[in-house]
Amino acid sequence: MAKLSYNELRVGTIFVKNDDPYPYKVLESSFVRMQQRKPVMQLKIVNLISGKTQEYSAHQNEDFEEAEIDVMPVIFIYQNRGEFWFNEKGNPKNRFQMKEDILGGAAEFLKPNTELTAYKFDDKIINVELPIKMDLKVTEAPPAVKGNTAQGGAKAVTLETGAKVNVPLFINEGDMIRVNTETKEYIERV
């Protein structure tokens, strides 16, 4: 593994801290230099195994190593009792499962035959990443209330995967919409 200094921890970098065996991915980073103090790199990082995000201040005396992560395309097959099953793209015999608590918010947007990116660390699949934008069908939508459209209001709808998203009032049951899977926000009608 390659050594990294604290100022090389940029957005998208996957690293291992000196005292922690888990890989982390940098979501946000900013270099901070305060008067009379040593500079630090303020980070927002996500643990790729647990999916938990945290704020972290990286100091120049800390050791970091670039994590050796293999990335491979996978296909989501099905879900049963909190277990989500995938197979390697192009190799349906290579199957693996992940628990809902590891997938976190990604689980509510998974539909069969969705292609995802899987992260492999120490020969073990540790996480999967959804496409940022996905097209999903609206299965339940309350009707728009007449006279409630002047302010461009919103309503909560249920998608084919069971996820609930706020959308504009003109969206109806049966419509296909594009959703940002990271922010869980409506983008547009497809």
Image: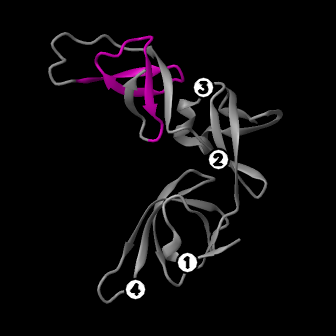
Q: Pointer 4: residues within 10 angstroms few (<14), some, or many (20+)?
A: few
- Check disc 4 and give the amino acid type: Lys
In this view, the residue in front, 19 or 45, is 45
Span shown in magenta: 153-182
Type of the residue with mark 1:
Ser
Earlier-in-chain disc, 2 versus 3? 3
The answer for how far apart the CA atoms under marks 2 and 4 are is 35 Å
- Spatial CA distance of label 3 from label 1 is 40 Å
Mark 1 or 4, nearer chain start: 1
Q: Is disc 4 placed on a helix, strand or loop? A: loop
Location of mark 4 (residue):
38
Q: Position of residue 80 (x, y in %)?
A: 69, 26
Numbered mark located on residue 127 in the image: 2
The amino acid type of the residue labelled 2 equals: Asn
Badge 3 vs badge 1, beta-carbon distance below 8 Å: no
Of pointers 3 and 4, the one earlier in the residue sequence: 4
User: In the visual, does 102 lie left or right of 32?
Assistant: right
Q: CA distance from mark 2 to mark 3?
A: 17 Å
Q: Residue at x 40, y 86 (%)?
A: 38
Q: Which residue is disc 3 drawn over?
A: 111
Magenta-drawn stretch contains 177:
yes
Residue 85 appears in the picture as rendered: yes
Could you tell me which residue is drawn at 60 percent across and 65 percent down? Answer: 15
> Disc 1 marks which residue?
5
Q: Is 78 on the left or on the right of 183, as rendered?
A: right
